[in-house]
Amino acid sequence: MSKYILPVSVFGTVFGSAVLLKNHVTGGRCPSKATVTGKTVVITGANTGIGKETARELAKRGGRIIMGCRDMEKCETAAKEIRGKTLNPHVYACHLDLASIKSIREFAERLKKEEKRVDVLINNAGVMRCPAWKTEDGFDMQFGVNHLGHFLLTNLLLEKLKESAPSRVINVSSLAHIIGNIDFEDLNWEKKKFDTKQAYCQSKLANVLFTRELAKRLQGTGVTVNAVHPGVVSTELGRHTGLHQSQFSSFMLGPFFSLLVKSPELGAQPSVFLAVSEEMEGVTGRYYDVMTEKEPAAQALDDEVARRLWEVSSRLVGLQEDGPPSSSKTEGVSEPELVQTPELA
Ligand SMILES: NC(=O)c1ccc[n+]([C@@H]2O[C@H](COP(=O)([O-])OP(=O)(O)OC[C@H]3O[C@@H](n4cnc5c(N)ncnc54)[C@H](OP(=O)(O)O)[C@@H]3O)[C@@H](O)[C@H]2O)c1
């Protein structure tokens, strides 16, 4: 019996310390006390997880919050809860399905018509490791929602962001980008065997490359854009993974896992930091690991890939400047409407 005492107590000490230190080690709270009174903040995927807590924190800081979500019942419930808890009445639920170009356009049109300004856009919504689903427009679901949907939304809101400058765009990416690869020959997983993990990593690498290219194109406009990895956070993101789907593992490993990862409240702090902090004023085109600036993976620093991804994405979502949108089956494109965006060419 005594031979087990040492290993058990070592394990207990390490585990206990990890739990106690986790908030500290994983970044803690946003050090800035800045408020956002009078500012309008748009957050995608705000009905749950990191997005909901970001909305709550920014509502507490006095912002006018627009929550863009695909499920209006969940969105209204979350907005109501946030209004009640923060006593900020200016928290609004708005329909946005990032898996539909039509829905993204409707959402952007509504904002352009009804909102005087957009000071902060937080591209937070995400889907991870889902089956080989396609968006309404035929894109791979993870590439379509995580990258293309936010790419189109941001472009459609750029004039509003410029009019509201200084303004900020925050792209919630992931450390997973480091094993991502942009496969220009088959962005939508139609030629090769579908690998859901790689599809997620590709989409998160695209978030960082989009940030880099957009920052370049926005030089001198007063609109900044940065990408962030929020840390490992206990949310519904893993809903399509084995851990969540197997009753055994969610029962046995779930509680252990949630002791070691951050709460959504702490997971929201990096987005809040990028959105409000004084030290982020004028900072653009960077990648943050939680609240610390880091160099992203080498493939996220490739300007040629970033430029090419911009061009292909523009074509796919119908933002192409010259010539009709691609109808290439390989790229899984329907025939979206052609829009002129000269300032973004
Ligand atoms: N959790 C982590 O450890 C972690 C780590 C690195 C990066 N991230 C990133 O953090 C972001 C937030 O994720 P989370 O952890 O908070 O996950 P989550 O709890 O699953 O929340 C994801 C949000 O995105 C929304 N969404 C999914 N598909 C959408 C669509 N087609 N249109 C509009 N909204 C859609 C979801 O809406 P429904 O509820 O209706 O599905 C939900 O509101 C993601 O970009 C994720 O990649 C998270």
Image (spheres, rainbow, N blue to C red):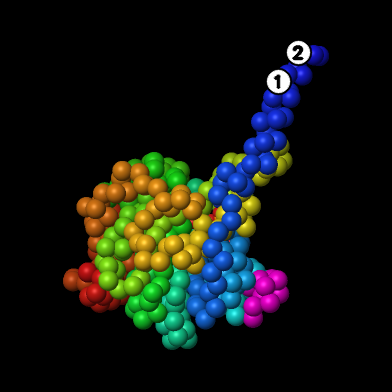
> Secondary structure beneath disc 2?
helix
Residue at label 2?
3
Q: Identify the image quadrant of residue 269.
A: bottom right
Quarter of the N terminus within the rendering: top right
Q: Is residue 293 left or right of residue 35?
A: left
Q: How far across and how far down the image is residue 100, in percent?
A: 44, 68
Q: Identify the image quadrant of residue 197.
A: top left
Q: Identify the image quadrant of residue 141.
A: bottom left
Residue farthest to the left?
A: 322
Q: Is residue 327 left or right of residue 158?
A: left
Examine the rendered structure and indicate whether residue 164 appears above or below residue 19: below
Task: Give the residues in magenta.
Answer: 79-89
Tell which of 84 and 25 is nearer to you. Answer: 25
Label 1 to label 2, Cα distance in Å? 8 Å
Name the kind of residue labelled 2 in the image: Lys
Q: Residue at x 49, y 51 (%)?
A: 290
| Residue 245 visible at all | no
